[in-house]
Image (tube, rainbow, N blue to C red):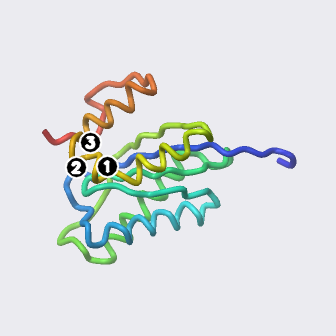
């Protein structure tokens, strides 16, 4: 619609199926660049993509014409295909169903960018389960534990 301008800032979180540590460090950056390319190809703004062996954080500037669910689906499907075609793993790669999506104001871009950038350091002291529960509590999202990601103890 002419004359309409907006930018929504969303942090997406995906987990590897079974929470396996399959995102190997030696090719992880290539996968993150590929994810960023998907976001850009969809005409959205890729701010930063980073993660660790079992999950990934994507910080995106989203136009309201793009549904978060569609973008998440496309990123997950395309990166699964990308990883599987590369043959980096002996078996198939896939993401768990679902995702986390958390919104931020423009004034939080720097802090969220640094948070996503420092995932490896962050997860030296906090598990993914603790991190994800913190997000749900911080954003006051009601949840049922049985519908969350598979968390390895």
Could you give the CA–CA distance between mark 1 and mark 2, rounded to whole angstroms? 6 Å
Q: Which mark is residue 128?
A: 3
Q: Label 2 crowding class (10 Å Cα cut-off): few <14, some 14-19, many 20+?
A: some
State how far apart marks 2 and 3 are (Cα): 10 Å
Number of labelled discs?
3
Q: Identify the residue at horizontal 72%, vertical 44% (top origin).
A: 6
Tag 2 and tag 3, C-beta contact below 8 Å: yes
Q: Residue at x 42, y 40 (%)?
A: 100
Q: Relative to 153, does residue 58 appear above or below in the rendering?
A: below
**Residue 91 versus residue 107 in the image, above or below:** below
* Mark 1 residue crowding within 10 angstroms, few (<14) / some (14–19) / many (20+): many
Q: Which residue is at 86% across, 49% downward? A: 2
Of the numbered discs 1 and 3, the one sitting upstream in the chain is: 1
Between disc 2 and disc 3, the foreground one is 3
Q: Secondary structure at mark 2?
A: helix
Answer with the quarter of the image where residue 43 lies: bottom right
Mark 1 and 2 residues: CB-CB less than 8 Å, in contact? yes
Q: Nearer the viewer, residue 109 or 41?
A: 109
Provide residue 86's location: percent of width, then percent of height. Answer: 32, 77
Q: Residue under circle 2?
A: 19
Q: Secondary structure at mark 1?
A: strand
**Residue 15 disc label:** 1
Q: Residue furthest right?
A: 2
Labelled pair 1, 3 in contact (Cβ < 8 Å): yes
- Estimate the spatial distance between the alpha carbons at disc 1 and disc 3, rounded to whole Å: 9 Å
Q: Disc number at residue 151?
A: none
Relative placement, left or right, of 25 versus 142 is left
Position of 151 with respect to 97 (left or right) is: left
Residue 37 x/y as whole percent: 52, 67
Whichever of callouts 2 and 3 sits on the residue coming sooner in the sequence is 2
């Amino acid at each position: 619609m002419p004359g309409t301008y907006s930018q929504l800032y969303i942090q997406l979180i995906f987990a590897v199926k079974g929470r396996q540590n399959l995102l190997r460090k030696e090719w992880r950056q290539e996968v993150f660049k590929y994810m960023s390319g998907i976001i850009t190809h969809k005409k959205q703004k890729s701010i930063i993509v980073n993660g660790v062996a079992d999950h990934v954080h994507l910080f995106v500037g989203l136009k309201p014409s793009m549904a978060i669910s569609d973008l998440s689906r496309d990123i997950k499907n395309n990166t699964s295909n990308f990883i599987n075609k590369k043959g980096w793993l002996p078996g198939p790669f896939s993401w768990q169903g679902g995702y986390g999506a958390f919104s931020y104001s423009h004034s939080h871009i720097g802090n969220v960018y640094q948070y996503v950038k420092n995932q490896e350091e962050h997860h030296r002291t906090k598990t993914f389960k603790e991190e994800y529960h913190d997000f749900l509590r911080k954003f006051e999202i009601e949840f049922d534990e049985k519908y969350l990601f598979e968390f390895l103890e």
